[in-house]
Image (cartoon, helix red, strand yellow):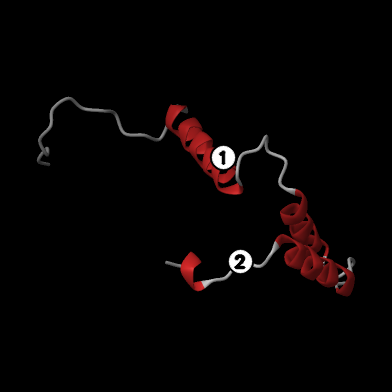
Amino acid sequence: MWELGHSVPATEDVDNLADIVVRALPAEEFPYLLEHIQQHLTGFGHGGASEFEYGLDLILDGLQTLKDAPREDAPPVRAGRGRESS
């Protein structure tokens, strides 16, 4: 639904707009914004994976690392399924 409400300009229009924005912003004041724009124009360089896939892989890898890491503060696992009374 979101995509239907937003028109996608032609690639050359986006490139022209980005070029105007890049030239108008002082690099010393907006270095990260300009870097972000360049990443979108040139791609993120992650082996062809989309930005979404790359981000999702980072999150899943981090979660797997946390899951596999031993936790010293974790309570001992008890057998049984029911709730224990105190």
Give percent across and percent down for residue 53. 55, 42
- The residue closer to the viewer here, 21 or 31, is 21
* Residue 31 location (% of width, % of height): 83, 62
- Number of residues whose C-alpha sits closer than 10 Å to that of mark 2, classed few (under 14), some (14–19) or many (20 or more): few
Question: Residue 58: which numbered mark, if any?
Answer: 1
Which secondary structure lies at badge 1? helix
Instruction: Indicate whether 60 appears above or below 44.
Output: above
Q: Which mark is residue 8?
A: 2
Which residue is more in the foreground, 59 or 73? Answer: 59
- Label located before the other in sequence (2 or 1): 2
Task: Name which residue lies at 49% across and 38% down.
Answer: 60
The residue shown at (36%, 34%) is 74
User: In this image, 46 relative to 63: left or right?
Assistant: right
Residue 65 higher or lower than 10, as above or below: above
Task: Indicate whether 77 appears above or below 27.
Answer: above
User: Which residue appears at 13% of the width and 27% of the height?
Assistant: 80
Image-quadrant location for residue 30 = bottom right
| Quadrant location of the C terminus in the rendered image | top left
The alpha-carbon separation of the residues under discs 2 and 1 comes to 28 Å
Can residue 71 be seen in the rendering of this structure? Answer: no
Q: Secondary structure at mark 2?
A: loop
- Quadrant containing the N terminus in the rendered view: bottom left
